[in-house]
Amino acid sequence: MKKQLMLIIFLGFSAIVYCQNALQECVQINFVKEDTTKNPADKFMAWIDCVNEKEIPSFSVKTLKDEKIKSKDLEGKIVVLNFWFIDCLPCIKELPALNRLVREYGKYKDVVFLSITWESKERIEKDFYSKYKLDFKVAANAQNVIDLFGKTGYPTTYVVGRDGHIKNAWLGGPIDDTAETEAYNRIKPVLDNLLK
């Protein structure tokens, strides 16, 4: 009986560790390991295929408005997670598209828009909000969460279904005028499908 209990505990712990490392593994396989046979576009597509349907890791963040959000609180909800930083030009350029999504889908109580950055709350309030607007809930000082998802590039966006699994993901973005609509055009059909 004691051996069975230990096995159950081990398997449960292994499942938790797997969930925590699955996204990091996708980054390792597709971006960190040297593979000269793959061009960057192929690596990008392989990363998307790898993270698709992976469960998001357990995390906890505090928003700029002092709201504590745990991944457990997001169960049963559709979540748009956006990773960014202040000096990231593609991150700034996609703000109109992201804000448009919040205006259109923010009325749904089961859709959450969460933006995560390693930047400090002070810097965001001083250097970002003085120039830009972002309607997502913003979590600052969240390097630990970024590490859980695996360091890719910026911006990185995930659309997570009610089951806690990633339904769509991409990284990077344009810096020309198409940036004002690209994120919206990518996320909108996914959200529409998940809301059916």
Image (tube, grey):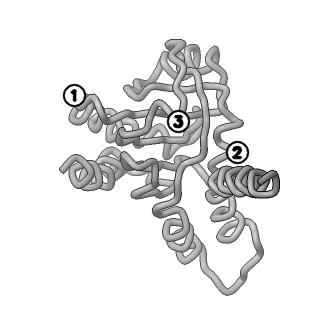
Q: Could you tell whether 109 is left or right of 45 in the image?
A: left
Q: Residue at image x 81%, y 51%? A: 2
Query: Disc 2 versus disc 3: distance between alpha carbons?
Result: 15 Å
The residue that disc 2 covers is 147
Image height of 143 relative to 52, above or below: above
Residue 34 found in image quarter? bottom right
Query: Disc 3 versus disc 1: distance between alpha carbons?
Result: 21 Å
Which of marks 1 and 2 precedes in the sequence? Answer: 1
Q: Could you tell whether 161 is left or right of 69 in the image?
A: left
User: x, y (%) of residue 15?
Assistant: 65, 55
Residue contact between numbered discs 3 and 1, judged by CB atoms under 8 Å: no
Residue contact between numbered discs 2 and 1, judged by CB atoms under 8 Å: no
User: x, y (%) of residue 62?
Assistant: 58, 21
Q: Residue at image x 60%, y 40%? A: 58
How dense is the environment of label 1, judged by Cα within 10 Å: few (below 14), some, or many (20 and up)? few
| Dot 3 amino acid type | Ser
Q: Secondary structure at mark 3?
A: helix
User: x, y (%) of residue 176?
Assistant: 40, 51
Image height of 166 relative to 113, above or below: below
Q: Secondary structure at mark 1?
A: loop
Image height of 133 relative to 174, above or below: above
Which of marks 1 and 3 precedes in the sequence? Answer: 3
User: x, y (%) of residue 158?
Assistant: 46, 50
Q: Between residues 108 and 163, which one lies in front from this camera angle?
A: 163
The residue that disc 3 covers is 71
Task: Residue at the far left: name it.
Answer: 196
Q: Residue at image x 66%, y 50%? A: 16
How dense is the environment of label 3, judged by Cα within 10 Å: few (below 14), some, or many (20 and up)? some
Residue contact between numbered discs 2 and 3, judged by CB atoms under 8 Å: no
Task: Residue at the far front: name it.
Answer: 1
| Dot 1 amino acid type | Lys
Residue 107: image tag? 1
